[in-house]
């Protein structure tokens, strides 16, 4: 980190107010080839996708045994736990672990598709599945907007710093 414009994910030196996990540092850190931070983001992405694949395969058996309602509830509670815990990220390994575990919730798509097959008539199953998948993707985007504008910004207006405001927002 050099001056007021960080260009790398090195630990801040001296009395710097910058942090390598600061929202202003992370984009430039991710874009800087060869840094430990870009490796952290890469490993967390690999973990998230890999665990989603494993959980999607495992969900077949769980759905047949426990039904879509119970499996979906369990998956969402599990995911919510890790999203709440994401407010406590303090190191590279904690970021990788938490992002990997949140990836399990990405497998909820499988439950949604089975649910559509059970609920809708055969002549509209394709439309129902496509609509459910699209709304699920859109919901993720809306959640991102909601967290920033309806939680993080008001917390900042109440006097919290940016770092604390996003952590409190992720907890709620």
Image (tube, rainbow, N blue to C red):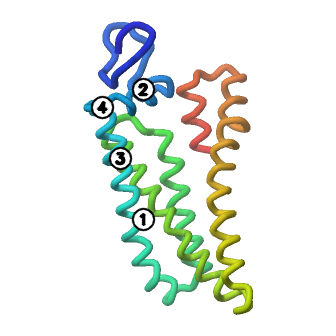
Q: Residue at x 34, y 22 (%)?
A: 8
Is residue 112 depicted above or below 165 in this figure? below
Marks 3 & 2, CB-CB < 8 Å contact: no
Question: Which label number is shown at residue 96?
Answer: 3
Is residue 110 depicted above or below 140 in this figure? below
The quarter of the picture where the C terminus appears is top right
Q: CA distance from mark 2 to mark 4?
A: 10 Å
Marks 1 & 4, CB-CB < 8 Å contact: no
Q: CA distance from mark 4 to mark 3?
A: 18 Å
The quarter of the picture where the N terminus appears is top left
Circle nearer the viewer, 1 or 2 = 2
Q: x, y percentage for residue 75?
A: 52, 68
Q: x, y percentage for residue 154?
A: 72, 29
Name the N-terminal-most of marks 1 and 2: 2
Q: CA distance from mark 1 to mark 2?
A: 28 Å
Crowding around mark 4 (Cα neighbors within 10 Å: few <14, some 14 to 19, many 20+) is few
**Secondary structure beneath label 4:** loop
Pointer 1: what residue?
A: 52
Q: x, y percentage for residue 76?
A: 57, 64
Name the N-terminal-most of marks 3 and 2: 2
Q: Residue at x 70, y 70 (%)?
A: 131
Question: Which label number is shown at residue 28?
Answer: 2
Crowding around mark 3 (Cα neighbors within 10 Å: few <14, some 14 to 19, many 20+) is many
Q: CA distance from mark 3 to mark 2?
A: 19 Å
Name the N-terminal-most of marks 1 and 4: 4
Pointer 4: what residue?
A: 33
**Secondary structure beneath label 3:** helix
């Amino acid at each position: 980190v050099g001056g007021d414009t960080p260009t790398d994910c090195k630990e801040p030196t001296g009395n710097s107010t910058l942090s390598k996990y600061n929202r202003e540092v992370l984009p430039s850190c991710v874009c800087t080839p060869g840094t430990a931070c870009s490796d952290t983001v890469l490993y967390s992405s690999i973990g998230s996708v890999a665990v989603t694949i494993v959980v999607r395969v495992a969900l077949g058996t769980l759905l047949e045994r426990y039904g879509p309602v119970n499996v979906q509830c369990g998956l969402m509670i599990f995911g919510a736990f890790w999203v709440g815990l994401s407010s406590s990220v303090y190191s590279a390994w904690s970021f990788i672990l938490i992002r990997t575990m949140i990836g399990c919730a990405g497998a909820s798509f499988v439950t949604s598709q089975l649910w559509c097959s059970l609920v809708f008539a055969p002549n509209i199953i394709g439309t129902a599945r496509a609509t459910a998948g699209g709304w699920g993707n859109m919901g993720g985007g809306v959640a991102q907007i909601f967290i920033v504008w309806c939680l993080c910004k008001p917390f900042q207006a109440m006097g919290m710093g940016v770092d604390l405001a996003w952590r409190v927002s992720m907890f709620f």
